Amino acid sequence: MNPKIIHPDKSIALFVKEILVFESTDEYRCNLPFYADGYPGLLFQRSKGDFLISPHNKKMPHIFLYGQTITPITINIAGPFQIIVFKFYPFVLRAFWDIHPESINDSCYYLEATPHTDIRQLITELSSSSNCHNNIRVLSAFLLNLFNTKKDNLDFSIKQAILNIIENNGQVAIGEIAKEARLNIRTFERRFLKETGLTAKQFAKIVQFQTSLKQLTSKDFHRLTDIVYENGFSDQSHFIRVFKSFTGSTPASFNK
């Protein structure tokens, strides 16, 4: 199932990359796979049946934060559902919620544990409406309020470094990014890991993988080597190794 992609309101576009909406009225069970993309996020869901994340087989609450997805996961949903995902630029979790981002890599953080935030009221307001656009408005207002309270905590040097890596599709020397940020390489790497939960090299590799994944799934290539060299992999075996580490399958089997 492909999500509906919504551009965030300009008031939150500084820290929200995009909003994804998945909806279904079918009664059967649905499985949604997710792979590393470099963006943590906030997820709200309303479903008739269980909402489980595999391979952890963990039943999830209505709203939660998730960290960097490094190993592939699958969301298993029974019956009709609505899922709204706010994908954050990965310099938000520590600043907004005082979370060590690395601590929730391949994991989640239940917002009920957040102090000084009336999450129950937020959940009640969201659960009382099945209107997707209304719920996006409510969540956007919630995040904007957080931003206005926490914006002094944001590391904008790391934000710019993140954008530079994204704009170069992960094919950029980390030393050059550090230089542009006017930081020595050790300070840059320490701050990048602190803010995002990944090293800059890991993040660049994920961006590189995502670019190749989009090319593969859109079938925008003649031969596999086109993807390999257009996306900066050293050779085909290198590409296959990286691709398998993030999806659990080879490019050939994934695209069948």
Image: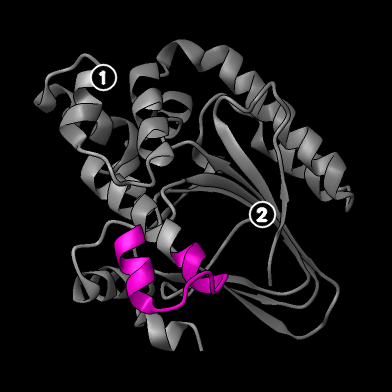
Color style of the picture: one colour
Question: Considering the numbered disc 2 on the image, is that residue within a helix, a strand or a loop?
Answer: loop
Task: Determine the residue located farthest toward the top in the rendered image.
Answer: 152
Q: Residue at x 66, y 54 (%)?
A: 62
* Of 254 and 173, the residue lying toward us: 173
Q: CA distance from mark 1 to mark 2?
A: 41 Å
Report whether 65 appears left or right of 1: left
Residue 86 % position (x, y): 62, 43
Q: Which residue is mark 1?
A: 180
Q: Main secondary structure of the magenta part?
A: helix
Residue closest to the eye, 166 or 73: 166
Find disc 2 in the rendering and name its residue.
62
Position of 137 relative to 228 (above/below): above
Label 1 sits on what residue type?
Glu
Q: Name the residue type under label 2.
A: His
Residue at (34% x, 58% y) in the render = 231
Q: Is residue 107 left or right of residue 151?
A: left
Q: Is residue 164 visible?
A: yes
Rendered location of residue 25, percent (x, y): 86, 73
Residue 53, can we see it? no
Q: Position of residue 246 (x, y in %)?
A: 34, 68
- Compare residues 115 and 39 and report the one nearer the observer: 39
> From which residue to which does the magenta span run?
213-230
Name the image quarter holding residue 46: bottom right
Give percent across and percent down for residue 234: 18, 63
Q: Are marks 1 and 2 in contact (CB under 8 Å)?
A: no
